Image (cartoon, coloured by chain):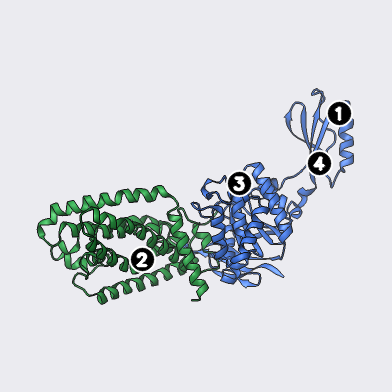
Chain colours: A blue, B green
Amino acid sequence: MQSISVTNLSKSYPQKKSNTPFFAVQKLNFDIREGEVVAFLGPNGAGKSTTIKMLSGILNPTSGHAQVMGLPAGSADANRQLGLVFGTRSQLFMHMTVYESLDMIAEIYYVTGENKKKRLLHLAELFQIERHLQSRVRTLSLGERMRCELVAALIHKPRVLLADEPTIGLDVVAKNRLRELVRVWQKEEKTTLLLTSHDLSDVEALCDRCILIDHGQKQYDGPLTGLKGDLSKVRRLQITVADHSIPYLQKNQRIQKLEDVNPYTHKYEVNTATISMTETISNLSQHYGESLQDLQIFEVSLEEVLSARFSHRELR
Amino acid sequence: MSLAVLSFHFRNAKFSFREAWSNLANGLIGFLLFPLFMFILANMWEKFNGHLGNYTYKEMVAYIGVTEILFITFLRGANITGASSDFSLSLARPRSWLAMQFSALYGKTLGARLVMTSLYFPLLLLFGLDVHQSSQILVRLLILLLPLGILQALYSLLFSSAHVRWEMTSYLTLPFSKLFLIFGGVFAPVSDFSEPARSVLLQMPTSDIFFQPGYFAIKGYFYQMSLVEWSMRICVQAALLLIFNILFFKNSKRYHQSFGG
């Protein structure tokens, strides 16, 4: 069954200085199967948040339609199947305790009685917020609050979770912890997750599939590895040498030198389609001999791929 | 509307009231200022309007107390992006946004007014009114608080639903409340105004929700109108506000753009 189904979805706004409307989203099509974890990527102004708003009923589409668990997006029944987390917004009640906030949010989603209590305590344990339950929301750190926001979004056991920048502003430790908790929860409940994030390490850690949009239109839909295209075969090698007087390896055209990190650390780039890693390492160790101290291999990051894709993008 | 839905909205109203009073410092400042306003405004009235002889000083103390209770809590809940949960997220919930906002605003307003009223009674005694007179005024005020709370919640809701569509309208809340302050007879009863201002102001919705309730509380009847007439005017206002609220809210889902990022 499809969790999310989007067909020719468009959203336009009238423009003051022009007769032609501005399209925030234009004829967008995609389907997401139940239990999939999908990244929804694009630069600022690409139409990601507008799409999420239409999926959750905050905005009505100008044309086309969207469905959540087979129900019209925005309907009360569809919203009961949906959980929402926005890194820049809060659905908790700042002056109340975490427990009181979660209790009220559960009631809003028709979760009552013993079920509510059980679910709340289970999620509190899973997301490690038990000791904050009696704290006022306004006293929590950002990392603690985001874990509580996730519990608030999941309290009614939604079948689909839309998460917009859930790790924004978090430090590395809090970010990694949140990702791990999300991974554990997703494994347990098999909920469909549509994740929007500018932090691509979130995406690489959690998602297998990615939908890329720009100017309101779909640019790519497929596995994360496919997004890299030919760049997926490119590897960077960082070597550290003991003797900095040894010249760079220049004879081999298939091993290209990149910038120096420092006189003792050099960087090279190879395309594994033209030269194997075995041959590359053999060439480098022959060239540097006993002086070679360390060798590290890196893939091209998703960030670089997207940066290359959108570097010539016109701002609007 | 089922019993479960009613019960939820009752809980929502109660929750909203508790949230508003969870910051005790704010509440206490209101408590401290309330008797001060009663004293200053009643004395100002005596100095400038006392010679008209329409009211006694004690009646004026009681009148100012009622209009202050109503005004201090007027449109205070309209700030939807403040302390409570984010409004855009609340649009994506499986319950009616308008109904949820209404019950929250009603709970916040009525609760705040009841808290102020609990202070009002001992203040009346302190200002020299006898127990019998103070009790009568209190009962009349309590009768009016329920319908006035509905109207107040609808006014606040109007600003909330307009805000979803036009973000800038939040800046209108303050000038709008000042209009009610000036024309509603909060500082001095509209009946003390000279003609033609008095007749004009009596026809405005501002006097229906401040001057007339204040007058009713101290006299036991409305000024130049019957209870039925006043009730009809309140119902018409409520109906119009409800229509505007629905129109603003429906429109908001087509246009509001304040949630990007």
Q: Which disc number belongs to residue A288?
A: 1
Q: Position of residue B21 (x, y in %)?
A: 42, 54
- Residue under label 2: B149
Please name which of the two marks, 3 or 2, marks the residue nearer to the observer: 2
Vertical placement of residue A126 versus B110, above or below:
above
In the picture, residue A195 is in which quadrant? Answer: bottom right
Please name which of the two marks, 4 or 3, marks the residue nearer to the observer: 3
- Residue under label 3: A143
- Same chain under badges 1 and 3? The reply is yes
SS for callout 3: helix
Mark 2, Cα crowd under 10 Å, few <14 / some 14-19 / many 20+, is many
Mark 3, Cα crowd under 10 Å, few <14 / some 14-19 / many 20+, is some
Q: Are marks 1 and 4 in contact (CB under 8 Å)?
A: no
- Residue under label 4: A270
Vertical placement of residue B3 versus B56, above or below:
below
- In screen coordinates, is A296 left or right of B156? right
Vertical placement of residue A315 versus A20, above or below:
above
